[in-house]
Image (cartoon, grey):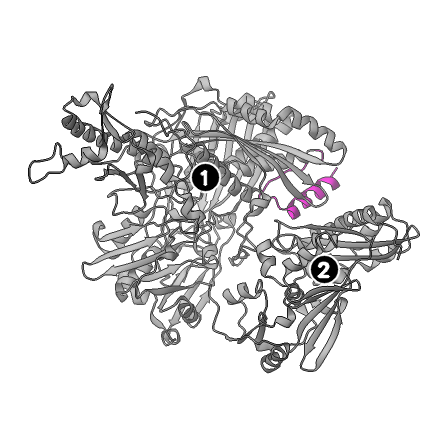
Amino acid sequence: MGAKYFGAAVKRREDPRFLRGEARYVDDVKLSGMLHAAFLRSPHAHARIASINADAARAMPGVVRVFTFRDLERWMKPLPLFGAPPPGLAAAIRFEIRQAAQHALVRDRARYVGEIVAMVVADSRYRAEDAVDRIDVEWEPLTPVVDMRAAAQPASPLVHEDWGSNLAIGFTHGIGDVDRAFAAADVVMRETFLIQRYVGMPLEGRGVVAAWDRRDGSLTTWNSTQVSHFVQQGLTLALDLPPHKIRVIAPDLGGGFGTKASGYPEDTLVPIASVVLGRPVKWVEDRREHMMGAAHARHQIHEIELAARRDGTIVGLRDRIWLDLGAYNVWGVVLPYNTVAHLIGPHRIRNMRVDVQAVVTHKTPNAPYRGAGRPETVFAMDRAVDCLARQLGLDAADIRRKNYIRADEMPFDFGMPYRDGNPLVYDTGDFPAALEAALNAAGYAELRRDQKRLRDAGVYRGIGLSGYVEGTAIGPFEGVTVKVDLAGHVTVATGAVNSGQGHETSFAQVAADALGVPIDWVTVIGGDTAAVPFGVGTFASRSAVTAGSSIVDAAAQVKEKLVRAAASLLEAAPADVDIDDGQALVRGAPGSAIPLAKVVQASIPTFAKPGVASPDFEASAYHHVPTVTYASAVHLAHVEVDVGTGHVRLLRYVVAHDCGKVINPTIVEGQVHGGVAQGVGGALFEEMVYDDQGQLLTGTLMDYLVPTAAELPPIETVHLEYPSPRNPLGVKGLGEGGAISPPAAIANAIEDALSPFGVRIRETPVSPSRLLALIDSARSSP
Amino acid sequence: MKPPPFEYVDPRTVDDVVAALHQHGDDAKVLAGGQSLMPMLNMRLARPAVVIDINRVTELDHLEEENGVLRVGALARQRALERWAAGRVPLIAAALRLVGHVAIRNRGTVVGSLTHADPAAELPALFVCLDGVARVRGSAGVRDVRAADLFVGPLTTSLGSDELMIETRWPLPRAGAGWGFHEVARRHGDFALVGVLALVTLAAGRIHDVRISIFGAGPTPARARAAEQRLAGAAPGAALARDAAALAGEGLTPDADLHASAAYRKSVARTLTERALTDAFARVKEDRG
């Protein structure tokens, strides 16, 4: 296979329609006779419903139906749960797991502000919302538990009474002999770090349109989801229909970030309304709903300890970790175990013990968001490493040089399982090289010299480092169907949904190379369950690896079929026939070239004769990946702190990263930039804040601060390519990486800038108010 | 996020607006640029029975300078003021650049921001700094309200429920006046955590007229009178800026919110006052009348 397109900076083919405002989002789906849903959401974090009276709402103009739990009781099946430990993981670690299934509508007890209590369907969204206002609920408020450590206490109010506690996931895990390592260490560094609750916040919120077709008993639903096959699966249970009667289409998405990879009540409520009413129903989430109804994320506490030798060699690691999952443990061991599996990162640490408690609280349920446990755990680790360096009087780069696993130690086996149950063994990478690449790109030595000089002038600048190793592209597969049409052009359909990653470009690059056709001949379809029978979806930095590999497999099968047909037509042996630039030809005989269209056409039977081959130029593939591939990066942040106001200015940001073979450098850089932007949000701006009654205080984008272009520094990207042996393309996952390290790198940079004061950053976001308080208290203590 | 039902009227003259306000009183809300009202309607936080849209009252859409006073009508957009000020009055231009974003300033009106009276907004603080005067029409007739008497609390002005602010008059800084403007916001375009505007004139080497307006640090934007008194008649210098800034915190009663503590606002008000004065001192030129 010739690599004409792989590795080239092909312009994103999907961009023109987005730039021209011609993208088709869920809200652009308008069907004849369509009704509109609006939801009554719980105003209480924890309350019992004594009674609901919807009579006034039902009498409102334009209202077609009001549904409470009682009205839909026969449809109310538990929503899907995920994240059971696979056998390899369950065999190695004893998890205590509790999962309670949420119903799409609250039956009698609301467990977070925003949980859905009733659905109104009306002839317009305006009238539906007016009617929601008129539903009268008699609430009996109960005491909520909001703080994660309070939730872990025995006397805490319970989120799910039958559990007897709020512990959703509990486990301990160790490698090596941590106690001996700590006993033999020269120094021990202990610190507690808090990573706040912050979220994906896609520009386009969620949305569902559902159309029930009574004629054949089938449902078509458009859903702004990253996982259309999961939504289909959920609906087969909820509606008791076989999959082929349910078509889920993810149209153009305005971002996903994991927020749209969770299962939601609205995914089934809107289709149920359509089935019951026999009319199409639309619901498009507004921002107010999104803040409380779409999944939250992050939110961990780490009590971390590092044991080290005086020269900075880290010999042991202990971490006591709390995770706040919100009201429902939807994702099982995913977040807790991701946190553990990525704690050590690029460091050569052979002795570790972790004690993990993931608790439920009366807040919006959490789900994986770009990084999914990794930004939190990397924050704890890289902050701890910097604190240790300061304690030992070592430079932040030097302590990492000493501890990073070298390329000659690869593959590196930790003797513990990854989340997929397979051994956690780093495949390829060169972490010290990434470190040096980031330092060189930034001009580290010069930055250090400037830092000294500027400090004398009252200017406080700092440099911060953070490195991660990320298990990417969790399996087990992604579905792909490749088809060639009568013109010789190609459709690639996949379960992977494009929510901005550039699939229509990078997948076309892979397919065009694999088939030997011009890229313009390839159309990529993602997220339509009718286009590919089995699929998984886009999350966990998985699509380039999983869908990419399946494209290679399926395209190879199709190419073989085309070659056989062409060989028959050209009267040559198949082994002598190749396809290049959309033409079939006998190798070494350019004059023999015939267009692919002719090969396809010659394969179609005519009245006179059968075709030269079966025109079945189509294949599906479900490439199985053995386990994850390990992408890695070192991030460097350069910041300036105004010590009079606590304001932090980001001066520069450098990312030296390895995502294996780069399919398209433009797309890779865009992914890195987007991830860094969200990481900057976590470092300095974004926080979902609740009061002690579980009321969400950040209910709008005036309170929940997403950084804009004005807040972002120039971002420089260095590509280091260490191909993975675990897939045919040599690629690794990339989607999440950018978001993992910024909170750690930026906090490290701030602390470095303020080292004359001895400020210690223990939590994010580092707001000016928080930072000035730290500076003032450091100044006033001796 | 759709507004609840309301009655909509779109009068063409100020008389008709005033009549509508007189008729509906507290049940009515005036819609101009809509940058605050529309989100509040959509979130159903504001539920007026009547929305009076003044966008077609063309007599209110004016902005002109006369004898050192800028007159800004109730329909003049923030962007129009920003454009007018560019290259003419750097203090106004600097403050306007931080009012939301361009898209917001294209719709948002100057008078709308004053009427909304957000204590952390730039325009009310600028109005206070420049000793502006608001001309108000109500069913009882026309009256003028000085900036110092206009803002009475967070999101509250001294206007009656049947009154419309039809025009504002902004006395422009004298040639040679030194100015300083500093604010801290979480992001570009956000409401300030704290901000300070300073304006200084110099006569015979001494500070003649000085105004310091602090916003985001109390229920309304406010002049730092104690600091101003310390400055009046003194010769500008770094030590003086520091001394005056120390007094600037006096009398401030900031609130804490999600984004900053009260102590932060008080402390940074002093820091920014010193910076604003330092800039003003560096920019001021002898007033030659």
Which numbered disc covers residue A395? none
Give the vertical position of A144 relative to A316 (above or below): below
Q: Chain of mark 2?
A: B
Near mark 1 (Cα within 10 A), the count class, few <14, some 14-19 or many ≥20, is many
Residue B20, percent across and down? 59, 80
Residue A650, percent across and down? 62, 39
Return the residue nearer the eye: A157 or A653.
Answer: A653
Mark 1 lies on residue: A371
Q: CA distance from mark 1 to mark 2?
A: 43 Å
Residue B196, percent across and down? 74, 54
Amino acid type shown at disc 2 = Ala
Amino acid type shown at disc 1 = Gly
Q: Is residue A772 shown in magenta?
A: yes
Residue ranking furthest to the right? B204
Q: Could you tell me if residue A503 is visible in this image? A: yes
Q: Is residue B162 left or right of residue B209?
A: left
Near mark 2 (Cα within 10 A), the count class, few <14, some 14-19 or many ≥20, is many
The stretch in magenta equals A756-782
Q: Is residue A108 shown in magenta?
A: no
Mark 2 lies on residue: B125
